[in-house]
Image (spheres, rainbow, N blue to C red):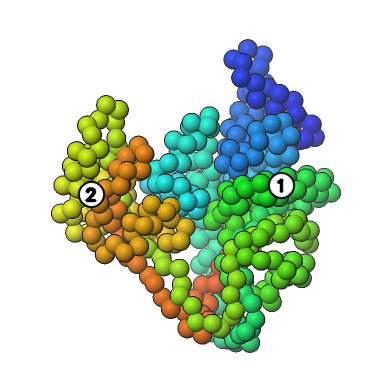
Amino acid sequence: MLARAAIVMTALLISCAPLRHAEAQDVDRIAAVVNDEIISIRDLDARLKLAITVSGLPDNIESRRRAVPQVLRKMVDERLQAQEASRLKVNVASEEILRGVSNIENQNRMPPGSLLPSLTKAGVDPDAIKDQIRADIVWVKLIMRSLQPSIRVGEDEITERIETIRQQFGQPEFMLAEIFLPVENARQEEEAKRLGERLIEQLRAGAPFQALARQFSQSGSAANGGVLGWMSPALLDDELREVVQRMDKGQVSSLVRTASGYAILAMIDKRVAGETTTSDPKISLAQVFFPIPQGAPPIQQLSAKAAELTTPLKSCREMEDLGRKLNSERSGRRDDLTLSVLPQNLRAIVTSLPLNKASAPVNVGDALLVAMVCSREENMVKGGLPTREAMRRTIEDERLEMMARRYLRDLRRAAFIDFRL
């Protein structure tokens, strides 16, 4: 039913002609009702346009027809999460959304501040990505407030898990990312399979895995671009273990049917458990953007002025204060950034930049960027064994993910949801 309606809807929405009165009424029709809130055809089209653009899919009837079921269900889940957050008075600040925008730019190795302008240029409403980011953040805050305090991890459990890892020394480990498409009933089987096959086609044509994961995956890792972290074969389901062990670094799997849906895996990296390695450094940055207005003086003059304002600064707090004084929304602090996923131009600046020292101004297109490294963590991982505290967090995260899935399932079961397509 969703697929049939998507063809009718898409014929309206991909037209470049101005909307006539009857067409405008169609666009304002209801796509779904979630308790006492509606998702309109207009809302759905904005999210479809976002998903298709960010994922590099062709914007045609076929792409939309296959994407509609997953996108609409994800929007329904977001409404349920937002309603629960409202009930529990969980809010999201505008600064958190801007940090979320920056994280997406990092994941996709985009220049800082380029995501929203690029979406606008492609005809995508920037509010669509902000709404998605807000939904991701509010859900994380909600489960951390409601579920995390109830999690208890025993010392014996930590010891047992570390010993299991020790026994895996000499065996391969995999850094994986996933796209997961759930199948909860017979009707969803064919929908998920067709979308999964389409996503694999796009991945093999060069579409970015993390962008597709963020838009279409329905697992807790979606907000992080699907990245799962380092996994040993013993932690994988049987049907996934066999696939992963045949994959090479940089390879994407075929569509894999699991007990609960379809999965696509990406092999980011491989290593041997127990080897001493250097972790990918994590850094925190403070950034100030100096917009380049039309008809501005030569870049050299603007750069000199930016350097004059930032060179005397000796702390990230001073950098943040300057950004606020300039009323620069893109300025601010960004924490827990992985060095390797930063855009090349920013990575080149901060790799050897001393702490609390402002960089030289860098031209990023529509602005000059000055960065300061607030902290840098570069740790040797000896013997491949995690600390007890790291293992505690890992177990907590696993339980939190499982409890979050149950939480969302319970919200669905208790809600009134009416798909109108």
Query: Of helix, strand and loop, which one carries label 1?
Result: helix
Classify 370 as above or below 58. Answer: below
- Mark 2 or 1: in front is 1
Q: Where is residue 75 in the image (x, y as percent from the top left)?
A: 62, 41
Decide if residue 285 is on the left or right side of residue 88: left
Q: Residue at x 53, y 32 (%)?
A: 122
Which residue is rendered at x = 59% and y = 63% of the image? 268
Image x and y of residue 234, in percent = 69, 77
Residue 260 in the figure: left or right of residue 156: right
Q: Identify the image quadrant of residue 359.
A: bottom left
Q: How many numbered circles are shown?
A: 2
Tell me if residue 177 can be seen: yes
What residue appears at the point 25 percent right and 38 percent down from the top-left corner?
299
- Is residue 385 visible in this depiction of the protein? no
x and y percent of residue 378 in the render? 39, 72
Q: Is residue 10 left or right of residue 112?
A: right
Between 131 and 417, the one nearer to me in the picture: 131
- Reading the image, the residue beneath label 1 is 201
Where, quadrant-wise, is the N terminus in this rendering? top right
Numbered mark located on residue 336 in the image: none
Query: In the rendered structure, which amino acid carries the disc numbered 2?
Result: Asp
SS of the residue at dot 2? helix
Name the amino acid type tagged 1: Glu
For the C terminus, the image quarter is top right
- Spot occupied by residue 231 in the image (x, y as percentages of width and height): 62, 71
User: Disc 2 and disc 1: Cα gap in Å?
Assistant: 47 Å
The one of 179 and 172 positioned closer to us in this rendering: 172
Task: Tell which residue pokes out farthest to the top in this image.
Answer: 21
Q: Residue at x 61, y 16 (%)?
A: 17
Q: How many other residues sit within 10 Å of disc 2, few (<14), some (14-19) or many (≥20)?
A: some
**Which residue is disc 2 drawn over?**
321
- 96 and 288: which is toward the camera: 288
